[in-house]
Amino acid sequence: MNSIPGRINPALLGFDFDGVIADTAEVFIRLACEKYDFCNIRIEDITNFEVEQCLQIAPEIVQAIFMEILLDSIGTGLQPMPDAVQVLGELTEQTEVTVVTARPEARPVYAWLEKFLPPGACSRIRIIAIGAHDNKALPIKQAGLSHFIDDRAETCTELSRDGIGAIVFDHPWNKNRHCLPTVSNWQDIRALCLEE
């Protein structure tokens, strides 16, 4: 693994939403059990970003679960990653925070953030919804960011090739799929860009 060189100005650091800010794996596992009776899935079993490649679940069920999360993140009980709310709150006190998501619509992401973040923090968050996992480099560069944290190794590899300081948010589905710098949690992110 490469180390991250020095402290990063939080104004220049962008974030993916699902798998970085929001604990999408937890809600996927829960809904797979509650609605489809797949109750033996552990997060360690999700060894591929393309979930249907590593779990014995029909692709149409995987798609239905993710579509439900996408359309109703609040109703499905999507939760923040541990410490994400606290650290995002601290970051928005210093600067505008940029989220670039593969989701097609920004509004549901704003609604979710408003539910969890401290009052006023959402007005300091810019959400760019691009509707695809690939080709994030252009909107990231247009947003003036130099670094980006994503949980999809392929996205980070692509960003790195395009000259963006890509950092992988460590999960079972990106293990041994890259040689980029990683963070394991939001306290790692805090240490990257906030003074003690």
Image (cartoon, grey):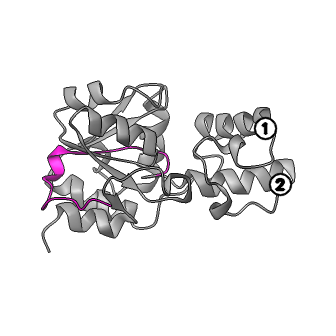
Residue type (three-letter) at the residue carrying disc 1: Ile
Residue type (three-letter) at the residue carrying disc 2: Phe
Q: Nearer the viewer, residue 67 or 89?
A: 67
- Tell me the quadrant of the picture where the N terminus can be found: bottom left
Q: Main secondary structure of the magenta part?
A: loop
Task: Give the quadrant of residue 181.
Answer: bottom left
Query: In this picture, is 191 found above or below 2?
Result: below
- Work out whether residue 167 can be spotted: yes
176 sits left or right of 84 in the view? right
Disc 1 designates what residue? 61
Task: Give the quadrant of residue 189.
Answer: bottom left
Q: Callout 2: few (<14), some (14-19), or many (20+) C-alpha neighbours within 10 Å?
A: some
Q: Position of residue 20 (x, y in %)?
A: 43, 52
Query: In this picture, is 172 found above or below 126?
Result: below
- Work out whether residue 126 can be spotted: no
Q: Name the residue: 42% across, 47% down.
A: 113
- Tell me the quadrant of the picture where the C terminus can be found: bottom left
Q: Nearer the viewer, residue 58 or 106?
A: 58
Q: Position of residue 83 (x, y in %)?
A: 39, 67
Q: Are marks 2 and 1 in contact (CB under 8 Å)?
A: yes
Q: Name the residue: 25% across, 31% down.
A: 162
Q: In the drawing, what numbered circle is on residue 38?
A: 2
Q: Nearer the viewer, residue 10 or 3?
A: 3
Q: Position of residue 187 (x, y in %)?
A: 32, 70
Helix, strand, or loop for circle 1?
helix
Q: In the image, which residues are magenta?
A: 1-19
Helix, strand, or loop for circle 2?
loop
92 sits left or right of 75 in the view? left
